[in-house]
Image (cartoon, rainbow, N blue to C red):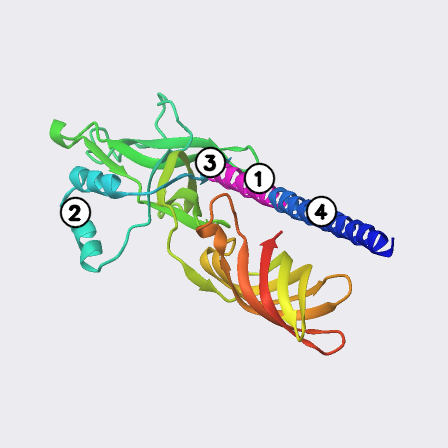
Amino acid sequence: MVENNTGKSISFKTYFEILKGIIFLFLCGCLVFGGLKVYAWFDRMQYNQAEADRVRLEEARKYQEYASNVVKAHTEVVNSLKMDIERLRKEGDDARKKLLADIEKRDEKINNLGEVVATLEGKSKELRVASDKSYEGKAPGDPNAYDMKLIEKRFADDKGNEQDVSIAWAMYYPNRPEDKRWKVAAEPLEYHTIVIQSEQKDGQFNTHLDSWAFNTRTKEKIPMTIEMAEFKQLKKEDKEFFWWAPHLSLNVDTGYSFDSSIIAGGISFSFSGYGRTKNDLDYRFLDLGVSTDGNTTYAKFTPFAWNIGNVVPFVHNSFLGPYVGMTTDSKYVVGLGLSIPF
């Protein structure tokens, strides 16, 4: 009977251990499934944010008019400017060809080129019967007698007041020989354009323009109407080191502390990085964080982390790197951490 009871007891314990194992595996599966779901949620959120940022930055590169002579040029980001540069060379004169040749000779790379078309703002005044200025001479038939007509542009200033600015003039001498009766000239005009370029978060540039003409004789400023401003710009692919590229991340750590292993989660902050832009990094450096598994809490330092999203499909901006840390009871922890920036 004892042996029989013992056999039943052993059998019951065996089933119980198997049941515990199944429950344990089920819980592990739930944790893994839940972890993957959480990771997928973070990854999808990050992808959606990156897509929203891309659309927003593209929208910010469209043409915008602040005033008729102050605009933000339309900028198209392209992968190659080779055909555009060749077109400039074919359509240009000798001076432009020499300019492009000098750029090649200096081993320089053209990353941004554009075209701007501007006209003098305002409507030309209708020619009136009366002269703007006249001189009848000292006596009838005086060869110095003349009628003068100003050729002007009329435009509204910032306050809406109409203003006439001379751009040329013509003088007629009725008493001189036919081939000497007219004298015409253009006003001495200088054309000015201020170019302001601002860098976006993805490393591309927006170009802003402010154009006007200036009559150096009358000291008058004449606004110009920018009819078209379009630029093409190479997509930034060059990578660089950024001393200040701050990112806050959620972490999943696996590590070892003396005689026990640790699987923990936490938060960290990285200071520097290397990549195409501050938001598109291949490596992150100088990462400080805090993690816990519920029982053990530790501060950690990750000297560098590599973006596995560059080689692993369907993964975006996930960084893997070694860390060393210290628990609240002064025990060292070493391990490997996966971080996902916000």
Residue type for callout 2 = Lys
Distance, label 3 to label 1, CA atoms, is: 22 Å
Three-letter amino acid code at disc 3? Lys
Q: Which residues are magenta?
A: 42-63
Q: Earlier in the sequence, mark 3 or mark 1?
A: 1
Tell me the tag on residue 97: 2
Q: Residue at x 48, y 38 (%)?
A: 58
User: How far from the left and from the top, in percent, is residue 199?
Assistant: 47, 51
Q: Residue furthest right?
A: 1
* Badge 1 vs badge 4, beta-carbon distance below 8 Å: no
Residue under numbered circle 4: 22
Q: CA distance from mark 2 to mark 4?
A: 78 Å
Give the residue drawn at x 40%, y 58%: 239
Secondary structure type for disc 3: loop
Nearer the observer, 341 or 226? 341
Please report whichever mark, 1 or 4, sits nearer to the chain's N-terminal start.
4
**Sequence-first disc among 4 and 3:** 4
Tag in front: 1 or 4: 4
In the image, is 19 to the left or to the right of 136? right
Inspect the image, locate mark 4, and give the three-letter code of the amino acid beneath it.
Answer: Ile
Q: How many marks?
A: 4
Can residue 67 be seen here? The reply is no
Nearer-N-terminus badge (2/4) = 4
Q: Which mark is residue 62?
A: 3
**Residue type at the position of mark 1:** Asn
CB-based contact (under 8 Å), mark 1 and mark 2: no
Residue 54 falls within the magenta-colored stretch: yes
Rounded to the nearest angstrom, the CA distance separating label 1 from label 4 is: 38 Å
Q: Is residue 192 left or right of residue 20?
A: left
Badge 1 crowding class, 10 Å Cα cut-off, few under 14, some 14 to 19, many 20 or more, is few
